[in-house]
Image (cartoon, grey):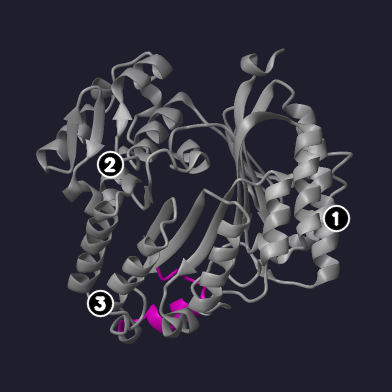
Amino acid sequence: MTMSEKKQLELYIHIPFCRRKCLYCDFLSSVSDEVTEKAYTSQLIEEIRTQSKFYTDYQITTIFIGGGTPSILPAQWIANIIDAVYESFAVEAQAEITIECNPGTVGPDKLAFYKETGINRLSFGLQSTDDKELKLLGRIHTYDEFLKSYQDAREAGFTNINVDLMSALPYQSVESWKNTLRKTVMLKPEHISAYSLIVEEGTPFFKEYGNAEGKKKLPDEDADREMYALTGEILKEHEYERYEISNYAKPGFECRHNIGYWTGAEYLGVGLGASSYVFGRRFHSERDLGKYMDIRIHEDLTPLYQEVQELTEEDKMEEFMYLGLRMMKGVSGSDFMYLFGQNMFNAFAEPIRKNIAMHLLQEEAPYLKLTEKGIDVSNRVFADFYEYLPREKY
C-alpha cells in the first residue's frame, strides 16, 4: 500500500508531568520526579511501538505532544519519543508536529534540538501578560520569561507558534484583558487560542471561587461579555481569522490537529489517560499512573483500554453536528449526505428549525453554522443535537 492509499490518523502523545500544578487545572497531570518521568518515557515508547502494529494501513498526519508540561522533559527524551513514532508508523512528509511548552522551561539549546527533531509547531501556555494574574493562576513563569522563551523560539527558526490566553480570571479587569491581547498581537504569533476560565470542580480554584462568595471575585457577566467582544475585535483588527469557537489564526496557520477533533478525523492517543477515536470506537487509556506503568504493553494492550464505546450510526451523526458546529464555517449538508446517505436537514429537522428560528443557527448552503448570537450560547445549541436521534428509528 502506497502512502497516498493509506488512511489518515492523528496522534496525540500525553506527558502527564508538571513542575507545579496550576490552581485552575483539572487535566490529568501531576508533579513527579526524574526517575518516574524516565520510566514513563520508556513505557510510552514501548506503547507507541506496540500500538503501531494495528495501524499499518494508516499514515500519521499530525502529532501533538501535550500534557502536563512536555517541555520539562530533557530534549533527548522528546527526540526519542518522536524517533519511535517515525520508526513505527508511516508519517506524512508534511505532518504537523506540535509540542506544548511552558515559558521558562525551554531555552535556545532545547528549542534548536526540537527543530532538528522535526517539531514544526510550538504552543506556549502564556494565559496572561500580567504577572499578578499569572501568580494568582499558579503559573510558574513571569511575562518576561515568556518573552525570552518566545524570542528564543523565533531565533531557533520556528515560524508556527500558538499562544494560549485566558480571560475572566479572578479580579481581572476589562482593561487588563485588553492589555494582554494587545501585547500578544504585537508579537505576531501565527495562532492564538483564547479561552474563558472555567472553574472546574476538584481544583483549588473551585474551593476558592466555586461558591457564591467566591464568584463575586470573578468578572461579572457584563465584564465577561465585554472581554469576549474585545477578543474578536482586536484579533480581527490584526488579521487573525476565527476558525473555531476559541481559536484564531493567520491565514494558513489553523491547527490541523485540533480541526481533526471537530471534524471526525480518527486519532490515537498514547500515554496515561489519552483519548482515542479509531475503528468506530471511543476509549481512553488507563488513568492511574501506577497501573499504567505495570501493564506489560509489549505483550497485551487490552488492560490499557478503558470505557470503550462502540459508536452507532446515530452517535456518529450527532457528533458530526455538535462537534462540527464548533467550526466557524459550520457543518456541510453535502458532507453529511456523503457520510451517512441522508439529508442533514431532514435528519435533524427539529433542532435545526428551532435554532434558526431563535437566530442561533443560519444556513449558508451547503453549510449550517452558528450565528454570532449562537456562538454566545453554543453549548445550549450543541445540547439540542446530543442524543437527539431515536435509536430505534434506524
- The mark found on residue 384 in the picture is 2
The quadrant of the rendering that contains the C terminus is top left
The quadrant of the rendering that contains the N terminus is top right
Mark whose residue sits in front, 3 or 2: 3
Secondary structure state at the residue bearing disc 3: helix
- The residue at the point 60 percent across, 45 percent down is 120
The residue wearing badge 1 is 294
Which residue is more in the foreground, 346 or 124?
A: 124
Q: CA distance from mark 3 to mark 2?
A: 36 Å
**Residue lying furthest front:** 155
Q: CA distance from mark 2 to mark 1?
A: 42 Å
In the image, is residue 391 above or below residue 305?
above
Q: CA distance from mark 3 to mark 1?
A: 50 Å
Q: In the picture provided, is 383 more to the left or to the right than 92?
A: left
First along the sequence among labels 2 and 1: 1
- The residue at the point 38 percent across, 59 percent down is 194
The residue wearing badge 3 is 175
Q: In the picture provided, is 278 more to the left or to the right than 197?
A: right
Q: In the picture provided, is 75 more to the left or to the right than 143?
A: right
* Residue 374 in the image, given as x and y percentages of width and height: 21, 47
Mark whose residue sits in front, 3 or 1: 3
Region of the chain picked out in magenta, as a range: 196-212
**Residue lying furthest left:** 357
Q: Quadrant of residue 149?
A: bottom right
